[in-house]
Amino acid sequence: MHDHPEIEETSKKKEKEKPAPSVLWPLFQTFKWPFLGHAVYKLIFDLLLFISPQLLSALISFMQDKTKPLWMGVAIAAMMFVIVLVQSMILHQYYHAMFRLGMYIRSVLTSMVYKKALVLSNKSRKNRTVGEIINLMSVDIQRLQDSTFFVNSFWSSPLQTEQMKYKDERIKLMSDVLNGIKILKLYAWEASIQKQILNIRKKELKVLKKLAYLQSVMTLMWTCAPFLVAVSTFSVYVTIDPENNVLTPQITFVALSLFNILRFPLAVFGTVFGMTIQLQVSNKRMKTFLAEEEIEEMPSDETALEGEMHRNDGYVSLRGRVAYVPQQAWIQNLSLKSNILFNQEFNEKLYKKVLEACSLAQDLESLPAGDATEIGEKGINLSGGQKQRVSLARALYSDSDIYLLDDSLAAVDAHVGKSIFENVIFYMAYIRAIGFKIAVTFLLVDIMGSSMGICGNLWLANWSDHAKEIQMRNETDSSETRFRLGVYAALGLGQVLFVTSAAIIMALGMVYASSILHENMLSNILRSPMSFFDVTPIGRILNRFSKDVDGVDTAIPRSLISFVQTAIASIEILLVIAWATPASLFAIGPLIFIYLAVLVGF
């Protein structure tokens, strides 16, 4: 092969010319009708949003006109309730359908990556680390699953790419450590290895901090937008024609209701923006992985079967089915029976015949649950000879035409141990990792920001209640209008300042918490006894360091911020309603009870 460099060069050129397969388009083709059908729910919800402001205008008009009959006001209020109820039902049906679609997409992509990983050629395996494949199946597929809720955008993808590069490097090193944990402990290399992993993690956190700051800037921009629209609109309205343009309650609250329709998509734009970047990066990584070279479907001999021979030209053919028994037995973390059946249908006669042929019948008597005994990681609770016989039995049960035995009678000793792996995070452990001071500061600053927004609306309400009096006084002096505009603008700017500050504080706390949780988990893993690694699958540990750490880095902060802001806004709104209309307390209590009952029940 080395004597013909022109062949290698031609092969490389062909590989470069070969385009990477599309991932998103086939997914859309597969699920286009469910996707488009579910999008109708969202379209109906968005259209219904514009009905509420019109009903609010009619309700305010009714309240100002004392001559209108009572039934009209009751009918308007009932229609507002029905519209909101229908909106809620449609929106939640949309979310349910999209989450279900996301699970379908996740299942398809996981199967694709798994099948591709099994057929990668030896050349491709050198380019793809275990850590990268694990991240593809856990982190990248999760991001593609989340893509059912948003559309494409393209900023800051270099940061996301850089972050995934460090994540792959960290998981690869972690995989090597776990596979060689016995040697590592024999030489007491835990501290040195931990330092190497944490150095990679520091680079990853540095990129994460940059992304968090970018998210804070996006929060600043899109928090300012609705406020600037409101200030500019009301300012132009009252100054362009002071005599005729009066800021009445009807105009004020209908306008605010319309502005609030704009507020939600702008508020979530930052989150959608970040998720879109993650989608773009994960899509690119998935495409390049699926384009990797595969093992020939019909290899010519055992070496080619193992993916260690590369065909540059010609063709190979093979008749019949092949079963391969390697020198080092490959055992799944399943029951002994499942290891032998290997997803094939159970044939009792053949099964017993295979057990006898491989001298496994006597071994079953020594196992705690016979052939239902679960085999530990890498067959840790089997002797070397037992593992080889199980591997041979799997090949025999497949009833193939050709059997390739690579010194399959070689055996190695192992020992058995027991341990329990527990790594539970929800939200209290995360808050403790952030630190009490940072958590309280974020809470207070966010409360101040939300309060500023409510005060701005109350100030605007007071202004509209006295609009006619102010207009009469403005005929001689317009300073009061300028004063009220100035106060409203100051309250809005204060809200923007506090909300942005809260985002920055949480960004710093998020990075610190991610660093602490990862470091503690790594330290605990490296100091666990060998008995723990004997019975704990390596994949389970790697998932903690890939998908779960990614959740700590991105998903938990996003969910925590959303929960805190929603809770604060809900409490403040209830307080304002109770202060303005004390009688509403009689309705709020039962409604909260019904809401909690539905929340717990469903």
Image (tube, rainbow, N blue to C red):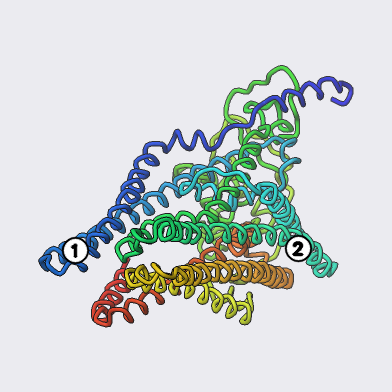
Quadrant of the image occupied by residue 184: bottom right
Q: Identify residue for label 2.
A: 202
Q: Is residue 532 visible?
A: no
Residue at 35%, 64% (x, y): give it. Answer: 247
Mark closer to the chain start, 2 or 1:
1
Give the residue type that dot 1 points to: Ala
Q: Secondary structure at mark 1?
A: helix
Residue receiving disc 1: 78
Up the image or down, 82 lies above or below 466; here it is above
- Label 1 neighbour load within 10 Å: few <14, some 14-19, many 20+: few
* Residue 259 picture quarter: bottom left
Callout 2 environment at 10 Å: few (<14), some (14 to 19), or many (20+)? few
Q: Please name the residue shown 37% across and 44% down the image.
A: 39
For residue 416, side relative to residue 442 (left or right): right
Q: Locate the N terminus and report the quarter of the image it occupies.
A: top right
Residue 500 sits in quarter = bottom right
What's the residue type where badge 2 is placed? Answer: Lys
- Residue farthest right in this picture: 3
Is residue 75 visible in the rendered image? The answer is yes
520 up-or-down from 371: above or below = below
Q: Count the numbered circles shown.
A: 2
Give the Cα distance between marks 2 and 1: 57 Å
Q: Which type of secondary structure does the marked residue at label 2 adopt? A: helix
